[in-house]
Amino acid sequence: MTDTYLTELHWRGLIQDQTPQLAERLRAGPLTGYAGFDPTAPSLQLGNVVPIMLLAHLQRAGGKPLVVLGGGTGLIGDPSGKRGERLLLDPATVEENVGRQRGQFERFLEFGSGRHDAEMLDNASWLLPVDLVGFMRDIGKHFTISLMLQKESIKRRMDEGISYTEFSYLLLQAYDFLHLYRARGCELQVGGSDQWGNITAGIDLIRRVAAAEVHGLSAPLVTTATGTKFGKTEQGTVWLDPDRTSPYQFYQFWINQDDGDVAAFLRMFTFKSRDTIDDLLARHEGDRGARLPHRALALDVTERVHGAGAARSAEQASRVLFGELDPTGADAATWELLAGEIPCRRLDLSAPLSAVDLVVRAELASSNGEARRLLAQRGIARNGVALDAADLTDRSHLLAGRYVWLRRGKKTDALLTVDG
């Protein structure tokens, strides 16, 4: 299993740290591994995709992945990567977030009852019944304060201050690993590099309590070529939930990646083979303007997260707005998607409408006079073609039987929608 897992992860740039004996253990046969996910939001974000990919490659190599949703630990809050204390969430919110995240994992992993099928667990089922005194006696005694203070997630918070609540998170995650080892024979925990201290705490606890050797693996923190944190835009975090980040915005995030990042992101965030990626990069060198690797990356990840239909509409919408696709060739689903991305207004076309009235009703001009000036300067396009002041708009100009697309200049868009 070593060659088909660790070698693959090394090539894809998905290994930061690993325990020394992991390769030897993998040579002995498949194993069960898990990653934990924080339910402090109702959606996963792009940063969560990295540990999901670690589990997905484990499954593809013949191992069994466990997805552990932190219904219990989410009530405490992981201090890793945080500069300040988290706001504590009430149990009902955590439970709701856990429920909403479940379906997002199914886009990456195969779930079922088979030997290598993924399973989803909620650590509330074993953490909430734990007796506090028994936990401190049986688990807490294996952790010294000096050891805990050496963990990076805690060390970086000492100046700002850290509550006992978050300070104790390390013990809870270590106990997760112990519980999964005992109950499910789980021998591997994976996560981002910020989780390495928590991972090794669990490994040490199992060694002390169960006299067993288990393993850990972490992926590097992903940054862009400019050094910025991956998964962030000017608009904020990129989410997997389409209500938080639309499929179009999601697609645009990927297609707008820098040339210096696209090769690494194809390896990290898709399952495309080495030959396929090498071919895309070679073709890119021959025609950089076509941005073939960027398109392949954007389409692949958007399809995996949002489905083939949404990905196709997002791709069409992007090509329309950037002048790469005749708008008459875009389907109704594409225009429906765009109606959520650019200003959209209702339009009555029971009678033909003059160009001036059209521009004013689209709110691309504040007055008839401004509209005439823009039209005289050929500054308005209708459905991708410059609009003349003498032009009329009627139902024959509708896109997908319902829409009229206007653009002022190069970037200001409006979509007009006509009922029946």
Image (cartoon, rainbow, N blue to C red):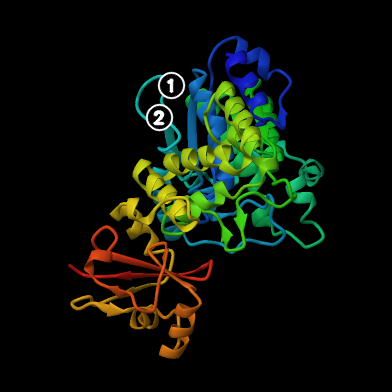
| 321 vs 354, nearest the viewer | 354
Position in image of residue 25 (x %, y %)? 63, 14
Compared to residue 349, the image places residue 404 above or below, namely above
Compared to residue 142, the image places residue 90 above or below, namely below
Mark 2 crowd level (few <14, some 14–19, many ≥20, 10 Å Cα): some
Position in image of residue 57 (x %, y %)? 54, 26
Residue 384 in view of the camera? yes
The quadrant in which the C terminus is found is: bottom left
Residue drawn 41% across and 49% down? 316
Residue drawn 70% across and 62% down? 84
Secondary structure of the residue carrying tag 2 is: loop
What's the distance in space between the residues labelled 2 and 1, CA to CA?
9 Å
- Please give the residue where the numbered disc 2 appears in the rendered image: 110
Quarter occupied by residue 96: bottom left
Numbered mark located on residue 116 in the image: 1
Secondary structure of the residue carrying tag 1 is: loop
Residue 212 in view of the camera? no
Quarter occupied by residue 207: top right
Q: Kindly check if marks 2 and 1 are in contact, taking CB atoms under 8 A apart as contact.
A: yes
Position in image of residue 189 (x %, y %)? 60, 31
Residue drawn 82% across and 60% down? 159
Q: Is residue 78 left or right of residue 70?
A: right
Q: Is residue 410 left or right of residue 191?
A: left
Q: Tell me which amino acid carries mark 2.
A: Glu
Q: Is tag 2's residue or tag 1's residue first in the polypeptide sequence?
A: 2
| 165 vs 26, nearest the viewer | 26
Q: Tell me which amino acid carries mark 1.
A: His
| 182 vs 33, nearest the viewer | 33
Position in image of residue 91 (x %, y %)? 45, 58
